Image (spheres, rainbow, N blue to C red):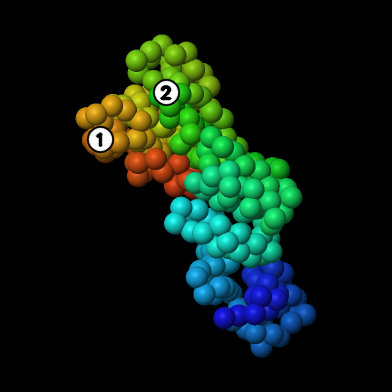
């Protein structure tokens, strides 16, 4: 196992990598020095976790802690090492006990009970593009908020429009002038799961759809909504797994950033 101080010293992010390459380009470093640094593009072995510090360079999305199934001690240890590497740390599906424990990593730790997320450190202050997150019902908001927190931590600007499902379609149509300003949508719906298809028929932007487990008996904990979204006749809709707000936030952020580059 790599000693902790050595792992932190050799930690690599995009800023440090850019600096190393610039020094080499300007003749301030040698190829041997550069190779010695790059051989530690790290993952950090703790015995119970292999922490992927290199992920932000490859994917522009750093490693995130999924809390269920981990002990509090494991979560705190992973968070501490990620935090030492730099940038905000996101933990998902956290409960208040986990959130309190993560305060020991950094006092600047925020827990959102509705989305069950913990953010350690300061997210980017400058956010780009525009993701609009829409829910069919109020019961879908916790999953939408997980997507919102995720996208904001990654650096996207997010607007939310909640409780505009098809049972009162006039509520959605009333927001059309705002909807057309999005770069990408996240649409969250349980029950019949039809809202992404409706929005897909009204706008040109890509849609990330999330079926939720909200609903009654034959909804089968989101299976009915999932099937509806997968069978949508509206083009340009991608469907996430049931209740996967985190995955939707990541995908919407990546699409949003593509818009920025163009």
Residue picked out by circle 2: 137
For marks 2 and 1, the one nearer the N-term is 2
Would residue 244 be found to the left or right of residue 260 on screen?
Answer: left
Residue picked out by circle 1: 220
Q: What residue is drawn where x is 49% and y is 17%?
A: 175
On the question of residue 151 being in view, the answer is no
Using a 10 Å C-alpha cutoff, classify the residue at mark 1 as few (fewer than 14 neighbours), some (14 to 19) or many (20 or more): some
Q: What residue is drawn where x is 34% and y is 35%?
A: 213
Examine the rendered structure and indicate whether residue 66 appears above or below residue 15. Answer: above
Q: Nearer the viewer, residue 238 or 161?
A: 161
Farthest residue toward the bottom?
32
Using a 10 Å C-alpha cutoff, classify the residue at mark 2 as few (fewer than 14 neighbours), some (14 to 19) or many (20 or more): some
Q: Nearer the viewer, residue 23 or 174?
A: 174
The image position of residue 104, as x and y in percent, is 70, 55
Q: Nearer the viewer, residue 38 or 67?
A: 67
Examine the rendered structure and indicate whether residue 48 appears above or below residue 138. Answer: below
The image position of residue 119, as x and y in percent, is 63, 47
The image position of residue 69, as x and y in percent, is 44, 57
* Dot 2: element: loop
């Amino acid at each position: 196992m790599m000693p902790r101080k050595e792992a932190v010293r050799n930690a690599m992010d995009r800023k440090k990598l850019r600096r190393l390459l610039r020094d080499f380009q300007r003749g301030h470093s040698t190829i041997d020095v550069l190779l010695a640094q790059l051989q530690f593009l790290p993952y950090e072995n703790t015995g119970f976790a292999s922490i992927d510090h290199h992920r932000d360079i490859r994917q522009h999305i750093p490693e995130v802690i999924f809390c269920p199934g981990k002990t509090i001690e494991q979560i705190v240890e992973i968070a501490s090492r990620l935090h030492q590497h730099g940038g905000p740390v996101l933990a998902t599906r956290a409960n208040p006990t986990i959130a309190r424990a993560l305060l020991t990593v950094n006092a600047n730790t925020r827990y959102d009970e509705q989305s069950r997320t913990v953010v350690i450190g300061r997210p980017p202050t400058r956010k780009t593009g525009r993701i609009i997150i829409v829910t069919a019902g109020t019961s879908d908001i916790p999953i939408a908020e997980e997507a919102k927190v995720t996208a904001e931590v990654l650096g996207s600007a997010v607007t939310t429009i909640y409780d505009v499902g098809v049972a009162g379609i006039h509520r959605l149509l009333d927001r059309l002038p705002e909807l057309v300003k999005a770069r990408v949508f996240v649409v969250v719906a349980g029950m019949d799961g039809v809202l992404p298809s409706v929005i897909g028929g009204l706008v040109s932007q890509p849609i990330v759809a999330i079926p939720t487990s909200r609903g009654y008996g034959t909804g089968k904990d989101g299976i009915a909504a999932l099937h509806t979204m997968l069978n949508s006749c509206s083009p340009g809709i991608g469907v996430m797994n049931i209740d996967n707000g985190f995955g939707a936030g990541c995908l919407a952020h990546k699409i949003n950033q593509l818009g920025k580059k163009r």
